[in-house]
Image (cartoon, helix red, strand yellow):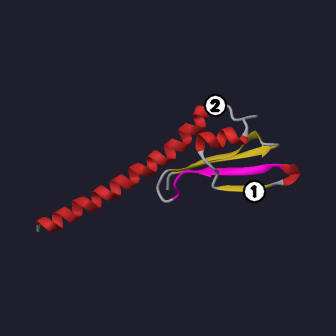
Amino acid sequence: SNLFLYSIVVTVGVAICGALIGSFSSNNLRSKMARLGNLRNRPYDEIVQNVGLPQSTSTGVDGVTICTWMSEPTVRPVFSVTLCFRDGRCTGMLNEMTLNR
């Protein structure tokens, strides 16, 4: 009976830790982006130095590069931001999203 109770406590503890880590991951990316302030005209390398490499990068028309950063996708809330770059500098934000479900 003590073993059963112990296993329940451990399972609940692991679930709570996972949720907290996910929340920190989401908030961490969001806070890192916020600390950079206005992203327009910031160099790609400076953004990467502060928030890490994007999860996806694609090349659009006219030499525009589109990069998306996303917090850990397996936990909620998920935060993502998509920025456009031209000649290595941010031209603006294409999308910012928080997914709670």
Mark toward the start of the polypeptide (1 vs 2): 2
Q: Position of residue 25 (x, y in %)?
A: 48, 48
- Observer-nearest residue: 52 or 34? 52
Residue 81 included in the magenta stretch of the image:
no
Q: Which residue is mark 1?
A: 58
In-image side of 11 versus 31 (left or right): left
Q: Main secondary structure of the magenta part?
A: strand
SS under mark 2: loop
Residue 3 in which image quadrant: bottom left
The quarter holding residue 38 reads: top right
Mark 1 → mark 2, Cα distance in angstroms:
24 Å
The location of residue 35, given as percent across then percent down, is 58, 32
- Taking the image as shown, residue 43 lies to the left or right of residue 97, namely right
> Looking at this rendering, what residue extends furthest in the right direction?
62
Q: Position of residue 49 (x, y in %)?
A: 62, 41
Residue plotted at (79% across, 55% down): 59
User: Start and end of the magenta stretch?
Assistant: 64-73
Q: Is residue 3 above or below residue 28?
A: below
Position of residue 57 measured from the top left corner of the image (x, y, whole percent): 71, 55
Circle 1: residue type: Ser
Q: How many marks?
A: 2
At a point 74% along the width and 51% down the height, the residue shown is 66
99 or 57: nearer the viewer: 57
Name the residue carrying label 2. 37
How would you rate the neighbour count of disc 1 (Cα within 10 Å): few for under 14, some for 14-19, many for 20 or more? few
| Quarter of the image with the N terminus in it | bottom left
Q: Does 68 appear above or below 2?
A: above
Residue type at mark 2 is Gly
